[in-house]
Each structure stands twice: as structure tokens, then as C-alpha cells.
Image: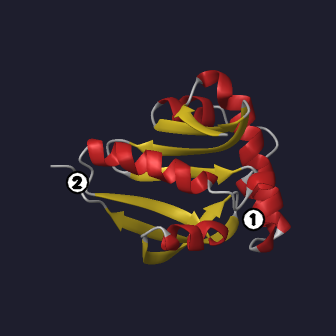
Amino acid sequence: MLTIRTYRPTDIEAIYSLFYNSVHKVAKKDYTPEQLAAWAKPQRNTERWDEGLLKQLVWVAEIESEVVGFTSLHPDSGYLDFMYTHHQYQGQGIATALLAALETEAIKLNLPELTTDSSLTARQFFLSHGFQLVAENIKTVDGIEFLNSRLKKILTVAQ
């Protein structure tokens, strides 16, 4: 059974492992080995991950106590930073459930919209959930360029 819960700092190892494996095993159909290596390194950047996640609202998806997905939201801006599903659990509704939890909270916070910079791999997921393409971006990490998409979704704010 799928459970969505809030992030705990003790989740960091499982979350980073999920991120790393998802990038290298799922996104490889859209990106080169060099791009994947720059995007997801074996060793996590603790400032970006450990400290950065504490500044965001983060939800974790679990099946029988195994972390199978996570997402995060910057509550001040409505920026959806992370959305990853375990590579062995793709297409099972996990990202949809995580997005629903995130959107519910964003509406409670009276955020007018969500924005994200989506990988080519995840773009269709977001478009199928009401996001619209704003722009194509070139992102550079460690001198390696990536194509991604700036997307947004207008929210119906609670009255």
C-alpha cells in the first residue's frame, strides 16, 4: 500500500539513492552518459541536499516502509524542485500521488501557481497533469549543457 508522508532528515540516504538511480536508470533514454554524470553524482552535495531539503516542504512516498518516491516545494515561491520515483516503480501512480499532496499544500498556502524546471524525461508527466510549457532552457552543470523545460500550473486557490 502506498503511503505519502512528510520528510524526515533520516530519509536523506534513501532519497539520494533513489534520485541517483532514477536519473541514471530512467533518464538515460533522454540524456547522454556525460549529462547523467554531471546531473547525479555518486556523492551528494550536502548543502544542496541535506540543508536544502530542510528549507522546503518535502513529501516521501513509501510502499511497505521502502522509499519509492519524493517531491519538494519551495513554499514561498511555488517552485517544485524535486519529483522522482524509484526506477523499479515507474508508472504506478506514485508521482501522481506525490503531486496531489504537493498541490493540496500549495493551495492551502494560497500559492497562485506552481513552476518547475522539468527534465525531458518528466515533461510529459507534468504536461498530462495540467502544467503548461513556458520555455525551453539550457542548463549547465559542470560545463555540461542540458535541455529542460520551464513549466507552470495555475492553481485554483482555496476560498
Q: Residue at x 66, y 28 (%)?
A: 11
Q: Position of residue 27 (x, y in %)?
A: 75, 65
Q: Which mark is residue 27?
A: 1
Left or right: where 82 falls relative to 15: left
Image height check: is 23 above or below 17?
Answer: below
At label 2, the amino acid type is Val
Q: Residue furthest left?
A: 159
Image height check: is 65 above or below 33?
Answer: above
Q: Residue at x 45, y 32 (%)?
A: 55
- In the rendered image, the quadrant that contains the N terminus is top right
Question: How many numbered marks, from 0 up?
Answer: 2
Q: Residue furthest top?
A: 10
Q: Residue at x 82, y 43 (%)?
A: 42
Residue placed most toward the observer, 126 or 28: 126
Label 1: which secondary element:
helix
Left or right: where 148 falls relative to 152: right
In this rendering, does residue 88 appear at all? yes
Measured in 3D between alpha carbons, the distance from the residue under mark 2 to the one under mark 1, in whole angstroms, is 33 Å
At label 1, the amino acid type is Ala
Label 2: which secondary element:
loop
Residue placed most toward the observer, 72 or 130: 130
Left or right: where 109 falls relative to 66: left
Residue placed most toward the observer, 14 or 98: 98
Label 1 neighbour load within 10 Å: few <14, some 14-19, many 20+: some
Q: Position of residue 46 (x, y in %)?
A: 65, 32
Q: Position of residue 102 (x, y in %)?
A: 44, 47
Image height check: is 64 above or below 20?
Answer: above
Q: Splitting the image into 4 quarters, where does residue 7 fall?
A: top right
Q: Position of residue 60 (x, y in %)?
A: 59, 37
Residue at label 2?
157
Give whichever of discs 2 and 1 has the lower sequence position.
1
